Image (cartoon, grey):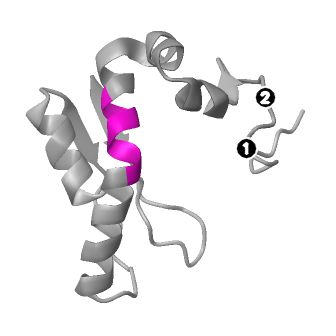
Amino acid sequence: MRVGVPKEVKDQENRVGLTPGSVEAFVSEGHTVLVETGAGLNRQTSSAVARTSTYALNNATLPYALNLAKYGWQEAAARDRHLAAGVCIIRGELVSSANGGAVMVSD
């Protein structure tokens, strides 16, 4: 599987979708990770904050990401009710509002 990490385009938003530890885990599982040039370049936090948040984010999300990569979204969701509860968009269609309205849908 190929995983892409784009540079954020929103003003003053410097986070990226994967941490260095997540990238390492994907690569160790045989996946390809492509990171857009300049992604995360303008972050304004110290390296200690970034390192701590990396560990926290990895611990919370990496098991889900690896299962999605290993099984695909349908089987991964069938195996994990928490992941299934978080599926909000399928093939571009909003199927659940479980995200608390964070997704904006326009006509």
Labels in figure, total: 2
Q: State yes or no: discs 1 and 2 in contact (Cβ < 8 Å).
A: yes
Residue density around tag 1, few if under 14, some if 14–19, many if 20 or more, within 10 Å: few
Q: Quadrant of residue 85?
A: top right
Residue 99 has which mark?
A: 1
Amino acid carrying label 2: it is Ser
Q: Quadrant of residue 91?
A: top right
Q: In the picture shown, does residue 89 fall above or below 78?
A: below
Q: Is-magenta flag for residue 54?
A: no
Q: Which residues, given as a range, are shown in magenta?
A: 60-66
Q: Position of residue 17 (x, y in %)?
A: 41, 53
Task: Give me the residue at 46% from left, 15% from top.
Answer: 79
Quadrant where the C terminus sits is top right
Task: Give me the residue at 25% from left, 42% from top.
Answer: 34
Residue 96 has which mark?
A: 2
27 or 34: nearer the viewer = 27
Amino acid carrying label 1: it is Asn
